Image (cartoon, rainbow, N blue to C red):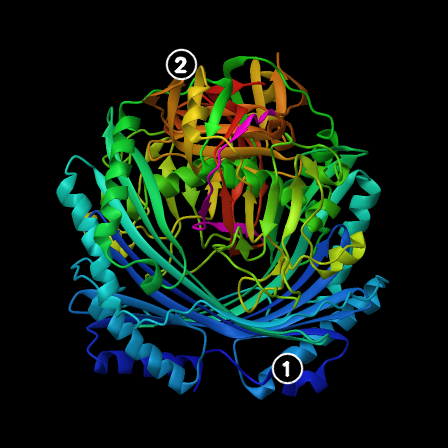
Amino acid sequence: MTEREILQYTLQKLEAAGAQAAHCSLLRSTKQEMNVEAGQMSLIRTVFSTNLHLMAIKEQRKGTYTINKLDLASIDKGILEVIEIAESSEPDSANGIADFQAPQKFTVGDTEPDLDGMYERLNAFLETVKERYPSIMLENVYLDFTHYNSFFMNSNGVDFTTSKGMYHFSAMFAGKEGEKSSSFNYSGFATKELDKALIEGGSLDLLLQQSCEQVNTQSFAGKFTGDVIVTPDCLGDFIGTFLDISIRDGALIAGTSVYKERIGKQIADSQLTVHSKPIADEIIDGYFLTSDGYKASNSTIIDKGVLTTFLLSLYGANKTGLDRAVNSGGCYVIEPGNSELAEIVRNVDRGILLARYSGGYPSQDGDFSGVAKNSYYIENGEIKYPITETMIAGNIAEMLLNVRDISRERISFGNAIVPWICFSGVTISGK
Amino acid sequence: MLTSNLQEYVPQFTGYTELRMQENRNLSIGFLKGNNTRNVKSTTSGISARVYQHGAWGFASSPDFTSESFRLVIASAGHNAQFLAKKANLGKPQLPVNSGAGSNSFATTKPRLKQRQLIDFIKQLDSYIGDKYPDLSSRSVSLNCLDMEKSLLTSDGSEAYSLIPRTIIAVSLTMDSEGKPLDLYDVFGGLGQFEDVFDNPEVLYGRIDSLYEHIRAKQSGVYASAGVKECILDPELAGILAHEAIGHTTEADLVLGGSIAANYLNKEVASPLVTLIDFANTAMGQTCPVPVYIDDEGTEADDAYIIDQGVLKGYMHNKESANHFKVAPTGNGRAYQFSDEPLIRMRNTAIMPGQSKLAAMISSVEDGYYLIRPNNGQADTTSEFMFGVVLGYEIKSGKLGRGIKDTTISGVAFDMLKTITMISDDMQWSAAGMCGKKQPIPTGMGGPAIKCRVNIGGR
């Protein structure tokens, strides 16, 4: 059977077994991955994957089962299993599946990797780092190409096909001179083509340079309330994480979200506009469908500081009576500001440039505290020195209201485009 | 049972080869404020081969168990190793021969419960909380079960089978505090399938009541005063310290990648009271939460002695790193899925118990904190660490005082360990977390309570 025939067979069998609604997805992928360990090429992986996901609703009871086999015996067993899981669930009228939409096929990227090209790009990265940043130790680096075909169908007639091929690069590294080391740092990006040197992607070159500087750090004494310029690599720990905590199903169903009645209200400084753009051209590594099986659209989550949408799934929307989101979040594009980063630094009386945050997961109300890693002390508008043993604490909901400036420069990671943002009023503690 | 005659594929091996069959079975049930929001199962299985040629590794995996798939995977892994060996000319030595054999299963011998019975178990816990504590603004109860079943054959003679299950129930309570949500969690369970770990939900009521008392104390609690303080770290925090701040820095691949621990071998890195071991499978006569008998490279797993009475004595190794350091492999090569290559991972990392009583340790603190529960932890290769702390109390004049709000502790582990002045004579393990290092993997963390000086974040 073809993939689509497998899904048609599965849906028919589920309905015959008593499911009033069902959806199924099938994914077949191949990953080719080249790995570097301790600065040397170490491993090439080839991973063939299959994933068949079954969801059935019977008398308002939902069950979900995932297998990775496509022989008929395994599929038939999976159908019985998902029906048993559904029958065991508590009934919930909020369970549902996506409405009918016109069938569509989505395609992005190549279907086959350029293996020689991958090797050459990765080897060139190793050589460039060795030459340009001799004190860098590469701990774990990989470049992969993953291609998948995925198929989604449901009992309302939804029928989507996606073909996607993408390269992903990730590097973890530290500076080391004699017995002195920097903290490790890491970054990466996604790309459709290997059309430029890996070191030029995302923020890698900048971070490698900084790790060399960060072999020699200083601590400072005392505690103060100051400005924190959060770098693009680090911003997701604040904005992305807090959106996950506060505007998705969990917090809104539980009623614990600090933004539960704030749609249309100012929740951030008017300089801040955050989009989720899974299908925008500028987002290379996006997605086309929500997990419920709706065709994804781009949306604006915070528009000049005003919260415009939650990120509710179909279940979350049915449960709360609020609107379903037009996408599943992520793929964040934050609008640039009007100032150069250098100018933002010049306007800081006292604060830090926060390049990596090692912190406790923020609480539901947004309180956080953690360590500023790979970061720099700023005083009188100048970056003074890399810091060690420095903690920061604050509240993310309050930080969003205290945006002091947003940089004109942004970094594209393939799945997000993010500027530097300066927040005021953060507690910074030295040793 | 996941078994096959892997021996029939030996003639296809080219050089050093590992051939593994694996199945991971996950089950997850969740209740959120009385709603059954999750009822999910998955089964992921397949085969993988890893080949070593002239210093280069090749790996391939497939979800299919057919003979053709075995041949394809072995050939692809060999091709990958050849491709890299030819291009990179790594010139590394052959791997040491260190074969092990064995079969270890922790499958229950009791009749397996139906999904509905599991749902009813979790629902009863949820209802207990909802009925008894109506002042909570939200609650969640979840069950997560993971079975990892593996068969392994290596070209140097290892042959192993294992089924290592884990069953965890997590309870989280949320309460309003000055108009904002405040939450606290606890987890129960560990090694074994559900039927061997849990019997009656009522057994957990006492721990839920205790959790409620703690969140009430936290609700009326205060923010910790920032700075370096004398603290008692409860076993959960001592365990995460052992794992994150010391364990990761002493994984041999990170040592080769620049970890600060490379500078400290045979040097004093902690108080002489501190002995820290990554146990393979058995500690003090008891089976550890995540027992590893033969690792995924086929090495018979041995305990890795990291710190002995304050002195750094060794690292955790796979075959390749053991070769580099000219020591015996410790059996730390572990893979999460069939499609993952073995990496150097911890197993059951613990600080060994001392001789003090917890009550005496608390009494000895004039002005400090008793810190009980982390919510996460991170450390880097400098051994600088950070742990979120979601449960703790003030200690004033040797007595426990007010609860504290969420906070963070941080420091440089190899400095902080030197400040330890007391270690309790008891020991607790936790095994609820997943360690992340390219792949997730279950690990055990353990320890006694320790008295130390540590930087605590305030507000």
Q: Secondary structure at mark 1?
A: helix
- On the picture, is B234 further left or further right than B98? left
Q: Chain of mark 2?
A: B
Residue under numbered circle 1: B72
Q: Quadrant for residue A353, please give it.
A: top right
Asked if badges 2 and 1 are on one and the same chain, I answer yes
Q: In this rendered view, identify the residue nearer to me: B40 or A105.
A: B40
The answer to whether residue A121 is seen in the rendering is no
Instruction: Give coordinates of residue B209: x percent, y percent.
Output: 23, 39
**What residue is drawn where x is 78% and y is 45%?**
A129
Residue A269: mark in rendering: none
Q: Three-letter amino acid code at disc 1? A: Leu
Quarter occupied by the C terminus of chain B: top left
Location of residue B256 in the rendering, given as x and y in whole percent from the top left corner: 75, 47
Reply yes or no: does residue B435 show up in magenta.
yes
Q: Viewer-proximal residue, A329 or B364?
A: B364
Task: Answer whether residue B380 is magenta in the image.
Answer: no
Q: Residue at x 69, y 84 (%)?
A: B10
Circle nearer the N terminus (2, 1): 1
Can residue A235 be seen here? Answer: yes
Left or right of residue A391, residue B42 in this image: left
Q: Position of residue B355 (x, y in %)?
A: 52, 33
Say whether residue B287 is left or right of residue A201.
left
The residue range painted magenta reads B419-437
Report the residue marked by disc 2.
B397
